[in-house]
Amino acid sequence: MGIFASQDRLRRPFSAFERKRNFQRCSTDNSNSLYPEHRMNAQNNSNMVKTQSTFRSAALWCCDLCLSENQHSLQHCIFCGKERVKPNKRDHYSPHARIMSAMETESIAVRDHHEMDEFNIEKISRDVIAYCQRHNMAFVDDQFPPSDRSLGISHNDHTIQWLPLSKIAPSTHLDDYLPWTIYDLPDPSDIHQGKLGDCWLMAALALITERPQMLQHILLTKKVNREGVYVVRICHNGIWTAVLLDSYFPCTFDSELAYSRAAHRQLYVSLIEKACAKLFGSYASLSEGSMAEGLQLLTGAPCDHINLHPIDETLDFDIVWAKLLSACESKLLIGISTSCSEIDQQAYKDAGLNPNHAFTVLAAKTLPVDDGRFLLVRDPHGTSNYSEESITPLMRTYLRAMYDQMPNSSGIFWISWFSFLRFFQSITISTYVSTHFDIREEIQFTRSPIDKVPAYYFVVAKTSLITVSLIYHRRVRKEKSRHTQSFVICNIEEDRSDVGTKEVIFLSRRGTFTYWTGTLPPGAYVIIPFSVSLWKTNNIRNNERTRSCTLAIHSSIRLDGALLEEPSTLLADCIIAAVIKYCDKPKYVCSIIFFLFYLCIFLLYLLE
């Protein structure tokens, strides 16, 4: 049996376990290991620290007795004294011993990442502050300087000047006597968008501000300092990156902040916007985007985007409602937008809604009446004045009683499901859960179907919710790419050569982001990412493309895993398992049996 894809033949499959393992990991145990790969050196001083690195060991391990977190170098729990139990000695499903011996990477609780990042970046920021204090100077970032280059070509605006924080004027007279803070009782209504077209980022930030504790995970610097040294965490290309910033910001000639800001002289909005501008090259690069992209930058978790008015398909709105109920029950971040082309601007105005605007869903409730589905919605800017006559005072009383966390602020209203579907265009649901765990690995898509492939092995100890994402590393933020991104997940057996005997998941998409979510039963699994589009062709442009990608795995339980380099025949084994599962009938042409695989967006032939 053989596989053909993009006219390249893969070699005959053989046992998944009769292969040479090449697991590269750091074995050094010294203080430098506490600072993962970063780009702050003599060759490239970009003052950004990537807080996950390829083939890394876990920075923390969890005690099996008291569940306390300990530094990776410790062999006994500092709280209860129990000896550390290695992953391959735990009492759970044990696949092939050589694979288990390589499983040194443990998933880390999402809520613990920011503490690790603070620890990793502390020395760098402390050294910068100490240097500034010795020379009695403020920090100026030479990698993102206060210049026209940092504004961007399209925003080479001569009405903009760069000012240090100490010289920036308050935006209103109410702020005259307030000191600058990073944040102080932040509220979504504090956020004001400036001249940039980055409403997508501000909408995502408004959602984050609904949960102020999440800002602590993003803003590693907690206090304004005289030296002007600030650190912000952004999940760039699927990898958490700590971005070092100075205190210079684009301002008008009235000395007010020109771009996005927060009321009451809070700095968090301007800092996060500047961190994103630095990562993407300029402020101008932040124009246009989606709320999903903004949420992924700020949470590191993928989003489920639902277009309520698709052109080429019919939605089951009962399923959409069920998703909203589930998301509200799980307290997920939910954003919605009014950009429905079928509704004119006047209709939005008459209803008291802002068109082309982002809102937050706070609750979804059902009453025992006809069309009894209702959503509690917040306009983060507090400017909407929506009211619906069909929602009677008695119904409002019942709804308020069902939602005992009713915020006391402007811009909050109930809307019926029928009216919601009329006025709103899309729903964006973030999968971020602070109590979940994640693993992030930088990989390279192969250049050829016969090259060795990156294969991530992991063990699921009990039935768990798993989300797998592939995030392509774009060179330019607005780069449009139609390449295919695919991955296959198969279970592996301890004493058998077959893969995918019980579980097979195959997913293929065009673009820079691919993700799957579902449950996996206990067992050992392998994930193999690949891109047919990036295999060698005569297309010079294809060969010059970056092949870097991040594999991110989110899970409801802690996982053990290892990234290994495997022969391409393992990919063939897994694809064959997927074809056997998903294909209905073989086709016969000239005595040749072949299968057509329709789950992928490229044409794949399997010959027998």
Image (tube, helix red, strand yellow):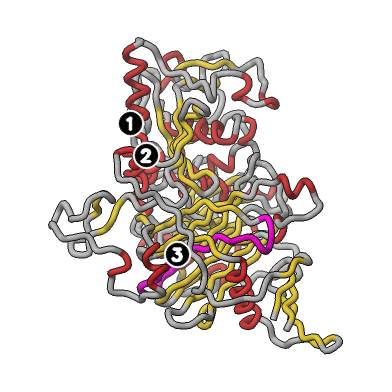
Label located before the other in sequence (1 or 2): 2
Mark number displayed over residue 599: none
Q: Where, quadrant-wise, is the N terminus in this rendering?
A: bottom right
Crowding at dot 3, Cα within 10 Å, few <14 / some 14-19 / many 20+, comes out as some
Magenta segment range?
447-466
Give the vertical position of 298 relative to 446 (above or below).
Answer: above
Q: Name the residue under label 3.
A: 395
Mark number displayed over residue 123: 1
Q: Which amino acid does label 2 sit on?
A: Tyr
Q: Where, quadrant-wise, is the C terminus in this rendering?
A: bottom right
Cβ atoms at labels 3 and 1 below 8 Å apart: no
Crowding at dot 2, Cα within 10 Å, few <14 / some 14-19 / many 20+, comes out as many
**Label 3 secondary element:** helix
Cβ atoms at labels 1 and 2 below 8 Å apart: yes
Cα–Cα gap, marks 1 and 2: 9 Å
Q: Name the residue under label 2.
A: 35
The location of residue 114, given as percent across then percent down, is 36, 44
Of residues 296 and 135, the one drawn nearer to the viewer in this rendering: 135
Cα–Cα gap, marks 2 and 3: 56 Å
The location of residue 93, given as percent across then percent down, is 36, 76
Q: What residue type is labelled 3?
A: Met
Cα–Cα gap, marks 3 and 1: 57 Å
**Residue visible at 66% across and 75% down in the picture:** 12
Assess whether residue 430 is covered by the magenta stretch: no
Q: In screen coordinates, is 211 left or right of 145?
A: left
**Label 2 secondary element:** loop
